[in-house]
């Protein structure tokens, strides 16, 4: 019986490493997967910021319109009127009259209320949204007492202070979110000046 012993240096070792091709394939898949995860995360973050901005703009718009509506309903007369500024004469207790001015501040892009020299900002970020159909980002409109039967707003517009009984506010708020605009168009109801006497 003969036994053969293989030399020590000729013992074959098993392969336990990855080839260069396998490593490159794994690295490519890792890069693609990481890119997809970051893109999805960015999309979710942009959506979250947009929803937060919509919520902020809606609540700010609601608060501003509540203050504006309260003053319009109490107003006894209009002192000045333009599409960007409005001064109301208020006399709620009939012994302490005062003036309130509402205006659009174009440089700050804000809707402001001023009474006795004190300015209160009601809404911010007022500007024209890209692709907006509004001719201006902000405007006041005034209307007569009675609506026309056909509902034509242009025919119902008041031309002077004497025939004005209703006021309306239109504006567009826009916030920028990661290079994209989030916009909210605000069109108020027509608020009736309950204390104002009108001549037609």
Image (spheres, helix red, strand yellow):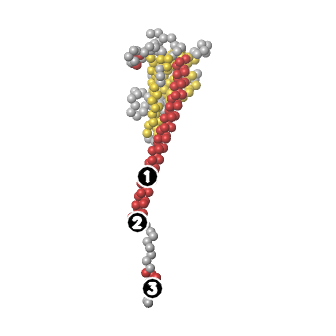
Query: Vertically, is 37 above or below 78?
Result: below
The residue under label 1 is 35
Out of 178 and 160, give the one closest to the viewer. Answer: 178
Residue at horizontal 51%, vertical 11%?
197
Q: CA distance from mark 3 to mark 2?
A: 35 Å
**Would you call the spot at circle 3 few (<14 residues within 10 Å), some (14-19), or many (20 or more)?**
few
Task: Name the spot of residue 138 as percent of width and height, x first.
Answer: 45, 26
Visible residue check, residue 80: no
Residue 172: which disc? none
Out of 94 and 41, give the one closest to the viewer. Answer: 41
Q: Quadrant of the C terminus?
A: top left
The residue under label 2 is 20
Query: Vertically, is 80 above or below 112?
Result: above
Visible residue check, residue 66: yes
Quarter location, residue 23: bottom left
Q: CA distance from mark 1 to mark 3?
A: 56 Å
**Would you call the spot at circle 2 few (<14 residues within 10 Å), some (14-19), or many (20 or more)?**
few
- Label 3: state its secondary structure: loop
**Extreme-top residue of the structure:** 199
**Would you call the spot at circle 1 few (<14 residues within 10 Å), some (14-19), or many (20 or more)?**
few
Of circles 3 and 2, which is in front?
3
**Extreme-bottom residue of the structure:** 1
Residue at horizontal 44%, vertical 69%?
17
The residue under label 3 is 5
CB contact under 8 Å: marks 1 and 3: no
């Amino acid at each position: 019986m003969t036994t053969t012993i293989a030399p020590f240096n000729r013992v074959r070792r098993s392969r336990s490493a990855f080839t260069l091709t396998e490593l490159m394939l794994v690295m490519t898949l890792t890069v693609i997967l990481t890119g997809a995860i970051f893109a999805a995360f960015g999309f979710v973050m942009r959506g979250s910021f947009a929803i937060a901005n919509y919520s902020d703009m809606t609540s700010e718009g609601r608060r501003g319109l509540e203050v504006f509506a309260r003053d319009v309903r109490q107003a006894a007369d209009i002192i000045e009127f333009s599409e960007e500024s409005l001064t109301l004469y208020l006399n709620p207790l009939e012994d302490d009259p005062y003036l309130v001015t509402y205006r659009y501040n174009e440089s700050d892009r804000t809707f402001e209320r001023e009474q006795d020299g004190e300015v209160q900002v009601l809404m911010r970020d007022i500007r024209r949204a890209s692709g907006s159909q509004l001719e201006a980002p902000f405007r006041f409109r005034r209307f007569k007492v009675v609506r026309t039967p056909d509902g034509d707003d242009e025919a119902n517009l008041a031309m002077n202070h004497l025939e004005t009984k209703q006021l309306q506010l239109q504006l567009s708020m826009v916030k920028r979110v990661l290079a994209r605009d989030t916009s909210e168009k605000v069109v108020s109801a027509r608020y009736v000046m309950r204390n104002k006497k009108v001549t037609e």
